Amino acid sequence: MTNYPSLVMLALKAALKAKDEILTVYDQKFDFEVKNDGTPITIADKNSNNAITSILNRTNILVISEETQSMAYYKRKNHEFLWLVDPLDGTKEFIKKNGEFTVNIGLIQNSVPVIGVTAVPVREIIYLGWLSKGAFKITICKNFKRHLKNNNIENILKHSDKLTSDNIFSRVNLAVSRSHPDDRTASIIQSLANENIPVKIIKKGSALKFCLLAEGSANIYMRGNYSYEWDTASGHALVNAAGGKVLSVIDGKPLKYNKPQLKNREFIAVASDKLLDIIKWKTFASKPDR
């Protein structure tokens, strides 16, 4: 039988350690390199990755991270469990020092995200999505660290804020990427304007957009260009646990994980089903999957 509480505790410990590594770099001058795909990487990305993998490796579950070589599909396709990690999501925001970056740790079981830990280092907050327990907002404080050290998950949850995404709303609060604008999102914004539907645009970096949905600050997050599984796994688990959904724009089905290619196509995350009809999102799902 899988010991989910133990896996949650290790993910929380990994996120906390990664948070400390990241802030140590954030508070001083640092340089960055550009990877082959054109994205930046800093010593904070590397240090965070090392901290996380050293802890998650204790679980004997395969860890796939943005900053480590991915295992070939034929070797991983039959794994029931998989960790997906982005050790510093939003490196561009980290370099700008605007605080909009996260640590993302997601546990996948049979292609479904079941545990998601998303840490927000500068805010000293961790969001936890646990499919069988719910979604929580955890303040990193002395009590949390004490309960974490004692492996007391029930006390951690007891002293955390329980989240639900399905709040009463009078307008569409649309979370969009600060650094990755796209035409499909722009089309939905225009469609809302044509229908005279009040909309507030909230620009945020990294997986913070999933966090906004889970806590009710936003109710839709649209991503009209590609992302990777480690970008979305933790946030997907969080939104699911809070009562929302993360769906492929192509077929309207939940995003799947541990695919042959670890790239996601366009997706939409919603706080509740009723929002899907309001934005008429299916009118934009015309492109076949490539």
Image (cartoon, rainbow, N blue to C red):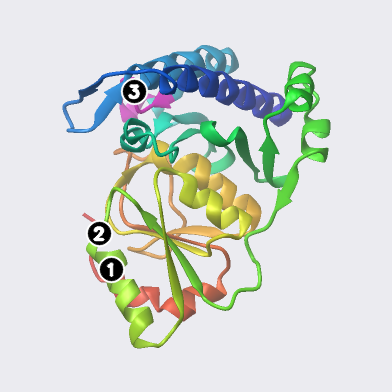
Disc 2, SS? loop
Q: Amino acid at mark 1?
A: Ala
Q: Nearer the viewer, residue 254 or 99?
A: 99
Rendering coords of residue 155 (x, y %): 83, 32
Q: Is residue 119 at all visible to an observer of this figure?
A: no
Identify the residue under disc 2.
182
Give neighbour class at mark 3: few <14, some 14-19, many 20+ (Cα, 10 Å): some
The disc, 2 or 3, on the residue closer to the chain's N-terminal end is 3
Q: Amino acid at mark 3?
A: Glu
Query: Which label sits in the foreground, 2 or 3?
Result: 2
The disc, 1 or 3, on the residue closer to the chain's N-terminal end is 3
Q: Amino acid at mark 2?
A: Asp
Rendering coords of residue 45 (x, y %): 37, 22
Q: Measured along the vertical axis of the image, is residue 167 above or below residue 22?
A: below
Tell me the quarter of the picture where residue 274 sits: bottom right
Q: CA distance from mark 1 to mark 2?
A: 7 Å
Labelled disc at residue 186: 1
**Residue at 58% from the left image edge and 67% from the top image edge:** 272
Q: Is residue 196 at all visible to an observer of this figure?
A: yes
Please say if the residues under marks 1 and 3 sit with CB atoms less than 8 Å apart: no
Q: CA distance from mark 1 to mark 3?
A: 31 Å
